[in-house]
Structures are given as C-alpha cells and as structure tokens.
Image (cartoon, rainbow, N blue to C red):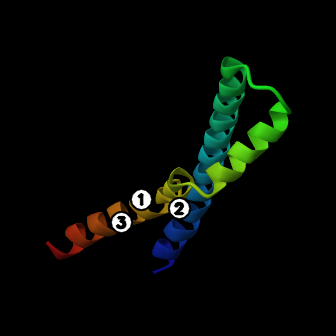
Amino acid sequence: MFALARLMVIGFVVLTVVYFCLSIYSRATRRNKLRAEFDAEGMSGDREAFVQEGLQEYDHSLRRKLILGVYVVPVVVVSIIIYLTNFH
C-alpha cells in the first residue's frame, strides 16, 4: 500500500511539472502567433493590448482545457495496466 501511495505522490509531482511546462510553452507559442498576426496584417494601435486581448480569449479556449489531459491520460493508462496485470 505504501508503494502505491508513493507512486501516486511522485506521479502527481511529475505530472504537475509537465503540466506547467506545457502550459507555459503553449501560452508563449500563442503570444508569438498573436504578435506575428499583428505585424503581418499591419494593424494600427497598441500591439501589447492586442496580444493581451488574444491571450484572454486563449485562457477560455478549449485548447487550454485540453492541456489538463496531462493528468487524466497517464492515470487512466496506469490504472488499466495495473488492472490487467493483477486481474487477467
């Protein structure tokens, strides 16, 4: 039982690090695309305001929520492996 608890704690820590790295990378990529879009279309006005508005839309997007799959997918896979190993 102690081994399972240790696996869960270590797995949660590792998945949290992966989640934050993926989240930061995705947000930086979106920021760069917004800056490139602003420059390519030759828009007038405040560039940073345009980027901030785009990032606020990104915060409510489906892609942002899909990153939470970092927690779900590994837990499901490990659970299936444990089940198949022990009960089949």
Mark 2 highlights which residue? 11
Judge left or right: residue 67 versus residue 53: left
- Residue furthest out toward the right: 46
User: What residue is shown at x 36% (from left), y 66% (from top)?
Assistant: 76
- The tag on residue 74 is 1
Labels 3 and 1 touching (C-beta < 8 A): yes
Picture quadrant where residue 41 is located: top right
Label 3, residues with CA under 10 Å away: few <14, some 14-19, many ≥20: few
Label 1, residues with CA under 10 Å away: few <14, some 14-19, many ≥20: few
Give the Cα distance between marks 3 and 1: 5 Å
State the SS at label 3: helix
Task: Please report whichever mark, 2 or 3, sits nearer to the chain's N-terminal start.
Answer: 2
Task: Please report whichever mark, 1 or 2, sits nearer to the chain's N-terminal start.
Answer: 2
| Relative height, residue 48 to residue 39 (above, below) | below
Q: Nearer the viewer, mark 1 or mark 2?
A: 1
**Amino acid under disc 1:** Pro
- Residue furthest out toward the bottom: 1
**Amino acid under disc 3:** Val
The N terminus lies in quadrant: bottom left
Image coordinates for residue 14, horizontal then vertical, percent? 58, 55
Labels 1 and 2 touching (C-beta < 8 A): yes
Give the Cα distance between marks 1 and 2: 9 Å
Mark 3 highlights which residue? 76
| Relative height, residue 22 to residue 31 (above, below) | below
Work out whether residue 19 or residue 6 is closer to the camera in this orientation and state it: 19
User: What residue is shown at x 41% (from left), y 59% (from top)?
Assistant: 74
